[in-house]
Each structure stands twice: as C-alpha cells, then as structure tokens.
C-alpha cells in the first residue's frame, strides 16, 4: 500500500479529468503569482494547491466560496498563459508531421514537382512563383519569410518563373503567383496575387488573405506572440 502511495507522489504534475485539471491550474497559478499577490492570498493558494496524504478531507471536500472567489479574481493574463501551455503540450503530443520554419528555394521544375508529389500527405505546401524585377515579388518573398517562422508545419517554397520550365505560363502579368497544395492536390491558385493587397502590404495581409480561404492551419506558438501578450498588459 505504501508503495502505491509513493508511486502516486512521483506522478508528473499533468493530470487528466476535472480534478486533475483543477489541481494543475492551482499549482500553475501558485507558481505564477507567488511573489505578486498578498501574503494572505499566497497562503490560501498554497493550501489549495498542496494535498497532504494525512488530510483526507482536503481530497474529497467541495471547493469553498472563498477559494472559488479567489480563482475568479486571478488575472486573465495568467489564465491565458496556462491555457496556452496546455494547448502547446497537446500540440507537441499530437503533431507528427515535419516542421520547416524557413522558405525553400526550388531550383528547377523537377524540384517543383517533387515537393508537390512527395511531400508528407499532411503537409500544406505554399509555392511562390516570382520573377526578378516584377513588382510585388520581392515584397511577397519577405512576407513569406515571416510566415514561415510562424507556421512551421507549412512548407513555404519559392521558384523563379524561368526555372519552372513553363515560363510561358507564368508571364509577368500573372506574377507574383501563389500556389497551394496538399497531398498532391491543388487547393489554391492565385495569379497576380498582389492585386488583392494595397500597394504596400505586409505578412499579416498575406496571412489574412490565405485564412479567408481556410488555407492556413492554426498558428504555431512563438516567442514573439508571448512577448506581445505580456507587453499588452503593461500599463
């Protein structure tokens, strides 16, 4: 029996089920605000988050009104962090596809066909067909560089129209072009794509455009996003 108790004490902090989630939240909140809340609240949070083996009532009793109100009073930023941490852990467990985090330069039509036909069936492939000197191509390349770091599960590629071997199909009038594939199937074919943007456009504009057609997955967790969230709460 004692061996069973010792094994339970050594289990990791992440539990499943309603009680496990509540306990994880209590511990996360305690660690996050230990130095920022009044001493009285810190002590109550410690009581809520610690479960001693000799205190059976603590394991079975209902949450008190005071405890409930304390949880309700805790700041929204910490709740967002906890939810983000849980989502990130779940994403890491469920993500089996390859990751990229950069834009790949395709050197030939063969490379173009290979990335479409042989890429992982769950991988979204976005190909930018460009030509030097064509308005908007260089700017779109910069936008895709940014998006590649935020959507690591998407394979962003670019290829010079001449290198495709089908330059007659990709004349300057239809460039820059964005082609979107998944499992070898063409999902999006956007010719002269910059006509959908203002003269000056940014990565967020390209992102919003692709999201209009539901062509991007949920955004990956990034350090930049975390910094922005924290910065937004500073007064």
Image: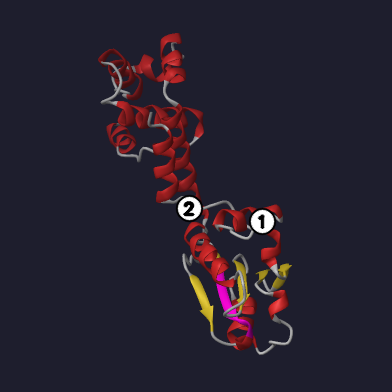
On screen, residue 66 above or below 164: above
On the image, the x and y values in percent for residue 113 come to 64, 83
Nearer to the camera, 71 or 181: 181
On the image, the x and y values in percent for residue 73 come to 44, 18
| Element under disc 1 | helix
Dot label at residue 209: 1
Q: Quadrant of the N terminus?
A: top left
Q: Give, as a single range, the part of the protein colored magenta.
A: 156-161
| Residue 199 visible from this viewpoint | yes
Q: Is residue 157 magenta?
A: yes
On the image, the x and y values in percent for residue 37 come to 30, 20
* Sequence-earlier tag: 2 or 1: 2
Where on the picture, by quarter, is residue 61?
Answer: top left
Residue 9 placement, left or right of 133: left
On the image, the x and y values in percent for residue 28 come to 36, 32
Q: Image point 33% across, 20% down: which residue?
A: 45
Magenta part, dominant SS: strand
Q: What whole-number distance in Å separates the C-alpha atoms at marks 2 and 1?
A: 30 Å
Q: Image point 28% across, 13% down: which residue?
A: 40
Q: Image point 59% across, 59% down: which residue?
A: 200
Q: Image point 60% across, 80% down: which residue?
A: 131
Q: Residues within 10 Å of mark 1 (few under 14, many from 20)?
A: some
On screen, residue 79 above or below 165: above
Q: Return the residue at label 2.
A: 93
| Residue 61 visible from this viewpoint | no
């Amino acid at each position: 029996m004692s061996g069973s108790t010792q094994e339970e004490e050594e289990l990791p902090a992440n539990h499943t089920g309603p009680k496990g989630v509540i306990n994880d939240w209590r511990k996360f909140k305690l660690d996050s605000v230990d130095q920022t809340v009044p001493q009285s609240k810190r002590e109550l949070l410690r009581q809520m988050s610690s479960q001693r083996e000799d205190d059976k009532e603590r394991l079975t009793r209902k949450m008190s009104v005071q405890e409930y109100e304390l949880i309700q009073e805790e700041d929204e930023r910490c709740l967002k962090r906890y939810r983000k941490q849980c989502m990130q852990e779940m994403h890491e467990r469920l993500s089996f596809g390859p990751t990229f985090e950069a834009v790949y330069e395709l050197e030939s039509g063969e490379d173009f066909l290979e990335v479409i036909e042989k890429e992982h069936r769950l991988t979204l492939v976005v190909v930018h067909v460009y030509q030097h000197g064509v308005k908007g191509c260089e700017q779109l390349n910069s936008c895709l560089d940014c998006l590649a770091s935020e959507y690591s599960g998407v394979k962003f590629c670019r290829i010079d129209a001449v290198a495709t071997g089908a330059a007659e199909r990709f004349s300057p009038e239809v460039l820059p072009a964005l082609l979107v594939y998944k499992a070898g199937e063409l999902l999006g074919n956007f010719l002269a794509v910059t006509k959908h943007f203002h003269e000056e456009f940014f990565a967020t504009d390209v992102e919003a455009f692709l999201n209009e057609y539901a062509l991007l997955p949920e955004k990956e967790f990034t350090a930049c996003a975390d910094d922005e969230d924290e910065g937004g709460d500073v007064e």
